[in-house]
Image (cartoon, rainbow, N blue to C red):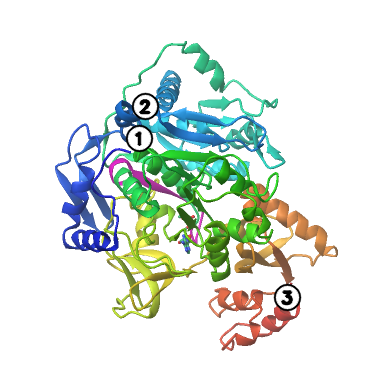
Amino acid sequence: MSTVDYQISSEEEYQKAYQAALDNPENFWSKIAEQFQWKNKWNKTLEWNFEEYDVKWFLGGKLNITENCIDRHLSEKGEQTAIIWEPNNPKDEVRTYTYNQLAQEVNRFATILQRNGIKKGDRICIYLPMIPEAAFAMLACARIGAIHSVVFAGFSAKALCDRIQDASAKMVITSDGLIRGTKKLLLRNIVGEAIADCDSIETVLTIRHTGDEVETNHLDKWYHEEYAALGEGEIHFEAESMDSEDELFILYTSGSTGKPKGVVHSCGGYMVYADYSFRNVFQYQDGDVFWCTADVGWITGHSYIVYGPLLAGACCLMFEGIPTYPTPGRFWKICEKHSVNQFYTAPTAIRALMGCGNDYPQNFKLDSLKVIGSVGEPINEEAWQWYSKEVGKGNCPVVDTWWQTETGGIMISNLGNIGEHIPTYAGLPLPGIQPVLLNTEGEIIEENGVEGLLAVRHPWPSMIRTTWGDHERCEQVYFSAFKGYYFTGDGARRDEKGHYRIIGRVDDVINVSGHRLGTAEIENAINAHENVVESAVVGYPHDIKGQGIYAYVICHVFPEDEKALRKEITAITSDIIGRIAKPDKIQFVIGLPKTRSGKIMRRILRKIADGTSDQLGDISTLLDPSVVEEIIKGKK
Ligand code: PRX
């Protein structure tokens, strides 16, 4: 690992760093940023305005993030492993790449992009399985200065099409197929369907992975052919000089209204914070093997499979498969096989594996583990305890990391073994992060031992810069609810010592198995069925998924065969969004509880869905209170 002086190793150092960042954020981040490789130093550290949203870090600085992820490590650790790839099928061969090999792969990939007309600023959509080429593709884009937009390969053709259109992407990088567990998807065929309506696409670059036969057309280029055409020799691709504030990537995420929005991150600030948060939260030491089980299609994969670990010169494991294939012992087997030191996963996976019994983790040697992490949704106490005891064997700190696509990196979390670890509490904010709890009036709640709305009052380097093509939306969503603050959309509790516990979303966003979905987005999909008049979707507590999707649906003609219509509605949500958006429960209703102004009272629907309809409170202001009775009677 390149030597840095900003890795905190004690509670005292944490306190000092936190205070330093509070007293003089610019000086704090500037000293950290100096330890990266810049082509040109910045002339101003920070400019910001939360009223009319604008944030810029390291102004005038020039860099390329891939020189920091790869080139600067080569002299000392060119022969050290950068990526270990564990395939879906445990019998298939593991692939490993040293930093030297990674450099070659990325230089070659960038050359292929250039030969296919890609230039700085172009948008490239990446729709790939969890294979090393996904990381190479992202880095190749960054090297040439193209903006990547990775779309999770579980999204449908329609969802992919929306994202390609929104970003006017010029190229899609995909593979013939994807295999997870026993399920196969022919990605190139899905891309074919998606791009039928996307005029911006000039090339489809397809990586041969599963060897399946797929439909191609005049836009296609096979990656292995392009690669072979480069010949055998070593290739160097000069990294493009990027401004600190040039866009590095777009990542689409759901909000409470409208279509998913493209969260934009920029080169300089994201780089500094991805590295800083990675090293400190996971307390990574040279020679460790770090494993994050997320998919690169989500922000967790961006920051803690690709950018964070590589910036720190770490060895990072990437896994193609699922936790339960071929058995629910797979995660633990991989930890044993590769002597994983830091393991980072989601509560949904923990709960699912907990349900499979203690024999699985007990059958494997897990003593290499030093830090185990959780991300994406609140972790309930039972799952936290099981994780700590059965996986961490009681001597690994659990880091419950709270953050968001928009924050770019972990914001609130314990740092490895440092400080107190309280089940279900994420802990303290990282140095440089200034969270506040607000009341509904937007006033700061100063005291501890309270609940409130979680906001942030000062910029940090990796914060969202804009939403692609629509800056107003960015201002509206994050900076308009409470003037002068970035509003997270989450509610939180702060204990007497200042530790934060995240309660969950306070808006119309639900978190299903750690996947973030807007209720409006699911409703729009359901409403696309010809027999649907209107629908309302809410989340309800689900043992494994954290939250399940409960849909109340009004039909033109009440279905004779409810089961058949449920199946059709489920199919439509899969088609329009993806399988992650399938409702768990669908209840056909004759009306929805609405106010006199026509607003659906979701609070009531949530209470019915979670079985607390005895606590509905005052419903007399509803246009027609009798629908509530009907809905309670028909509850699924
Ligand atoms: O509600 C919070 C929840 O996930 C949301 C962000 O989702 P996304 O942008 O998809 O990013 C997920 C991975 C960073 C947050 O608004 N969330 C994330 N981490 C936690 C969490 N809720 C509770 N505890 C966490 N550790």
Q: Position of residue 52 (x, y in %)?
A: 26, 58
Q: CA distance from mark 1 to mark 2?
A: 12 Å
Quadrant where the N terminus is found in the figure: top left
Classed neighbour count for the residue bearing mark 3: other residues with Cα under 10 Å, few (<14), some (14–19), many (≥20): some
Dot 3: what SS?
loop
Residue at 32% of width from left, 43% of height from top?
271
Residue at label 1? 69
The span picked out in magenta is 255-269
Classed neighbour count for the residue bearing mark 1: other residues with Cα under 10 Å, few (<14), some (14–19), many (≥20): many
Q: Which tag, 3 or 2, sits closer to the chain's start? A: 2
Q: Nearer the viewer, mark 1 or mark 2?
A: 2
Residue at label 2? 78
Dot 1: what SS?
helix
Q: Nearer the viewer, mark 3 or mark 1?
A: 1
Residue at label 3? 635
Q: Nearer the viewer, mark 3 or mark 2?
A: 2
Q: Residue furthest right?
A: 560
Numbered badge on residue 337: none
Residue at 35% of width from left, 39% of height from top?
311
Using the rendered image of the protein, determine whether residue 559 is visible from the camera's viewpoint: yes
Dot 2 amino acid type: Gly
Q: Examine the image and state in which quarter residue 544 appears.
A: bottom right
Q: Position of residue 529 (x, y in %)?
A: 70, 55
Q: Which tag, 3 or 1, sits closer to the chain's start? A: 1
